[in-house]
Amino acid sequence: MRKTGIFAGISLAVIGGTVTFFSGMPASKAADIDAKKLFMTHCKTCHGEDGHPTDLGLGLGAREFANAEWQAKTTDEQIIKQINNGTPEKMMPFKEKLTQDEIKALVSVIRSFGKK
């Protein structure tokens, strides 16, 4: 009986570790990212708190995240690429400033503006 309990415990630990390893991100890390706070810190200056560009953002050609047409035609991958690489002389690249997990988390915030 004791050997069965030890085997079961080890099996669960191995399975949990395998899932975490192959997912590419520790389970607790994804839950620790506050995407809204990231947006407010890094994006709202140009994209506004509500997804409507600020005056500065308009001058730089910032996207209207609240625009349903833009939301429908833009993929998550395109959003991630834009955040990573930016646009010369308009938007700074964030690939050196944010982790890839943080950048991916920002997609949900950007998508939320299309639902209002």
Image: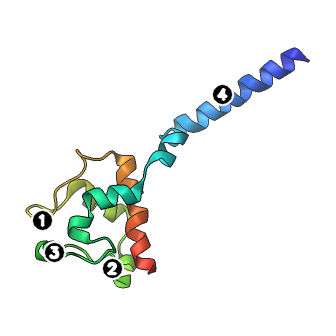
Q: Residues within 10 Å of mark 1 (few under 14, many from 20)?
A: few
Q: Position of residue 94 (x, y in %)?
A: 23, 52
In primary-sequence order, the first of circles 3 and 2 is 3
Q: Tell me which amino acid carries mark 3.
A: Gly
Q: Which mark is residue 61?
A: 3
Are the residues tagged 3 and 2 within 8 Å (C-beta)?
A: no
Mark toward the viewer: 1 or 4 = 1
Tell me whether circle 3 and circle 1 mark residues in contact (CB < 8 Å).
Answer: yes
Q: Which mark is residue 90?
A: 1
Q: Is residue 67 above or below residue 45?
A: below
Provide the residue designation for mark 2: 70
Q: Are discs 2 and 4 less than 8 Å apart at CB?
A: no
Secondary structure, mark 2, is helix
Looking at the figure, which quarter contains the C terminus?
Answer: bottom left
- For label 4, the SS is helix
When asked about the image quadrant of residue 54, the answer is bottom left
Three-letter code, disc 2? Trp
Label located before the other in sequence (2 or 4): 4
Mark pair 4, 3: CA separation: 50 Å
**What residue sits 56% from the left and 37% below the top?**
20
- Disc assigned to residue 30: none
| Residue pictured at 87% horizontal, 15% vertical | 2
Residue in the picture at 39% in, 60% down: 36
* Horizontal and vertical percent position of residue 28: 53, 41
Q: Could you say whether the residue bearing mark 1 is in a helix, strand or loop?
A: loop
In the rendering, at what x and y percent does residue 9 appear? 75, 25
| Closer to viewer: mark 4 or mark 3 | 3
- Amino acid type at circle 4 is Val
Mark with earlier residue (3, 1): 3
Q: Residue furthest top?
A: 3
Residue 14 numbered mark, or none: 4
Task: Name the side, left or right, on which 53 lies relative to 101.
Answer: left
